[in-house]
Structures are given as structure tokens and as C-alpha cells.
Amino acid sequence: MDVRFDGAAGRVTGSLHQVQAAGKRLLLDCGMVQGSDEEEAINTQPFNFDVAAIDAVVISHAHIDHIGRLPLLVARGYKGPIYAQNATAELMPIMLMDAASLQESDAERSNRQRRDGEPEVVPLYTKDDVQKMMPLVRTIDYHQRTQILPGIEVNLLDAGHILGSSIIEVYADGRKLVFSGDLGPKGTPILRDAENPQVADLLMMESTYGDRDHKDRAETIQELGDILTAAWNDGGNLLIPAFAVGRSQELLYFFARHWDEWQMSRWQIFLDSPMAGKVVQVYDHHHELFDAEAQDAWKGTPNPFRLPNLRVTDSVEDSMAINKIDRGAIIIAGNGMASGGRILHHFKQNLGRPQAHVMFVGYQAQNTLGRRMVNGARSVRIHGEEIQVNAKVHTVGGLSAHMGQTELLEWYGAFKPSPPVALLHGEDDARTALAGEIKQRYGVDAQLVKPGDTAKV
């Protein structure tokens, strides 16, 4: 079995890896690169492999940086199966249709602004491309070892990152490859803790937070409450960039669990996302994937997805109407790195107000608008307009959906014996730090893979 690392190798986004085994070729993930315009231009480039030669695709989870180029893969000639866990398969069309819609809107906006002689901007893919892709999706449940190609079997374990997220085990040629996907920390709201495969001939392991740990969960809860109080006392709105799957649901869960303590009834809460209602339905279909505490919460009052002051906005008109509110609103909108989506429109209305607050609750990739704001930028450019950042900006690291360094090392340490490991899905500082700890504790030299690097299982 041979592996080639084609994406998320030296960066966090754009997960894409090739596996050659038993005379067949498969892809693990086919994600979109997210970041600056220059980085996202990578998405438009030809795949550096023969698309027609790929026999199967296996997806770890439904975040766009893991599935975002699937419609493009199909549009360029792929006709084989795409395997995913059941909940992931339900989330995929929601995520991809939204991504296609954003790309179509961005292309339309750019074309309205282009000068004479400039080429027409074409979306990476369209909603029609997504519809053509979806019939290729096949579902696999957790712990259902399945032959996906002659001589190649796959087993999925719960990764505890978002609903349906999976650790992928690949069995072929008498060997076992483990791809961690994205690993959620212990105690993540709603979800069960990540499982551990314990045995691997090669481990492909994420390293997003390989250089640091997150705040204690109790401290994080206190921090959330303090930010809510400060935002209310300052008399402005609280803007929360958050991806529609995962963090948005966790925030609503916390609002319900601390309803009285945080005086949540005084706020107007907006989940401003065309796909939010659909995502809620997927969660309601899969209570079997919840941990015991979350299953109890869904039976209680208030239900996290049916808070009495929660409004899920679908239409553009409803979204625009939120901008008439200048105080007392919590606005959760995508995307989580503020690199696109409805949150940008709310930023344009609110960032200049000293009484407004912005709370980042997830990882901010290099060169994204979110990363610039977290790093203290006093002005940002949105839709061609320079916007002053007078709002107060908060970063709540303890809500991360990724394991921190200590948990990553403990997860790796559960493998017996310690396997060779390729570190991916992380920036170089994080990967280097994690590799140093793995060497010191377990005596293994971790491979810090770059695009095009290979490994033999």
C-alpha cells in the first residue's frame, strides 16, 4: 500500500490524499483550500492525478475543507463511488449546495465589477454539479467493515469532531492504514468522544493544534458567560462567525444549558444561515450519535434547537433585516473563518461600532479575514470596502473541535506498538512542535509531509 499526500500537507485546509493498493487507487477526502485569494486559486488548478484512474473516494467528514472539491472531481470525469458515514452523507448536499451558491454569488458580484477586457469569472462549480455528484454517494455506518474495492476494505470509527466525523481504517495488501481525519477533544458538547484504533502500520494524523492545549472546559464556559455579559452591558450586538455544522449547534447547546445563568431570554438570537434548518433536521435524525448528556438535554426545556427567542433566517431579505438591529442581538453566521458568507455583511454593519463585540470560536487559518482580526487588525477589507474594526474582538479557544497537543499525544500513545506517523492538517509550527513531543515520548520520527510526498505502508 502506497500513500501520496496531495492536500492539507503543510496547511490546515484542502484535505486530499491518494492511496494505491491491490491494484486500485482511492482518495481519502477531496477538500477545498481555504484562505487568501491566492491560496483559494489552488482549487481551480487541475488535479495532479488522472481523475479517471481513481476507483473510489472515502470521506472523513462533511466540512468543506474535506469535501469541497468533490463536485469538481465529478465534473472533471470521476464516475466511481464516494463512501461516507450515514450522517456525513446527509450533511454533504447541504454543505455543498451552500458552497456552490456562494461561489455563484461571488462570481456574479465579481462580474458586475469587472472592467472592460477582464475575463469573466466562472464559479468553481455550480448547484447543478452538486446534484450530478450526489448519486455517487454510498453510506457506511460506524464499525461496519466494508469491501469497497476488490482487495480493499474500509472501517469507520467515531472521530468526535462533528456529527458523522470518522477515523478511516483502510485494510489492503495485508496492511492497515489509519487516517485520523479531524479528532474532536474529550467532552465536546453533543458528540461522543473519539475512538482509538490502537493498531496501525501507518498513521496519517491531524496536527491542527499540535503546539498547544485549549483552555479548560469550565474556564471556557465562564469566558462565554463573561463575553455575553460584557456585550449586553456595552449595548451592542454580538457577532459570532461559525460554520453551520458543529460549532453553531454547540453554541445553541450552551445557551440552553446556561439559559438562566446567562440570562439568555433577554437576547434576540439569530442563526443566519440558509442551511441551518436543514442541518438541525440532520441532527434530529441522528440522536443515536449523541452522548448521554446531550440526549438528556434534547428531552429538556428549552430544547437547544428550539429556544424561544431563536430565529433561523433563510431568505436574503430576512438576513438583511437583522442589520436594522443595533443592540441586543446575537448573530451566528457563516463562515467560521469569515472568508465568505453572510457574516461579512454583518461585519460591514457592526465592526465600526465600539459597542459591538465579535467572538471567534474556531480555528482561523492563515491569511483569512478571521485570522487578521484575531491578530489585531484595526481595519479589514470586505467586498472591496475598507472597514474600521472598532468592535471588541474575542477568541474563545476552548471551544475548538480539534484535540490539543496533550490529547493528540495521548491518542497516539494508545497505539501499540507506536506506528510510523505522517503529520498533516496543520501549519508547520504546530506540526514541528507535535513531532518533537512524539520523538521525545515515543522515539518515533514523525514525517512532516509536503504536497507530493509519499509513504509506504
Image (cartoon, helix red, strand yellow):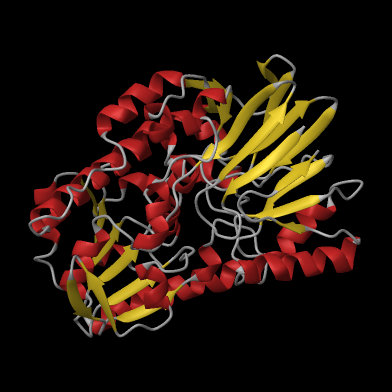
Near-viewer residue (74 or 240): 74
Q: Quadrant of residue 423?
A: bottom right
Residue 241: image location, x then y, percent: 34, 62
Q: Quadrant of residue 231?
A: bottom left
Asked whether, in this view, residue 327 is left or right of residue 173, the answer is left
Identify which residue is drawn at 37% across, 48% down: 244
Front one among 22 and 307: 22
Relative to residue 302, is residue 28 depicted above or below? above
Of residues 344 and 234, the one nearer the viewer is 344
Image position of 403 with respect to 306: above or below: below
**Visible residue check, residue 337:** no
Q: Return the x and y of residue 291 as percentages of the image width and height.
A: 59, 43
241 and 114: which is toward the camera: 114
Residue 413 screen position, x and y as percent: 84, 54
- Is residue 129 in view from this perspective? yes
Residue drawn at x 82%, y 24% as measured from the top left: 173
**Quarter holding residue 393:** bottom left
Quadrant position of the C terminus in the picture: top right
Where residue 364 appears, x then y in whole percent?
46, 66
Image quadrant where one finds the N terminus: top right
Counting labels gives 0
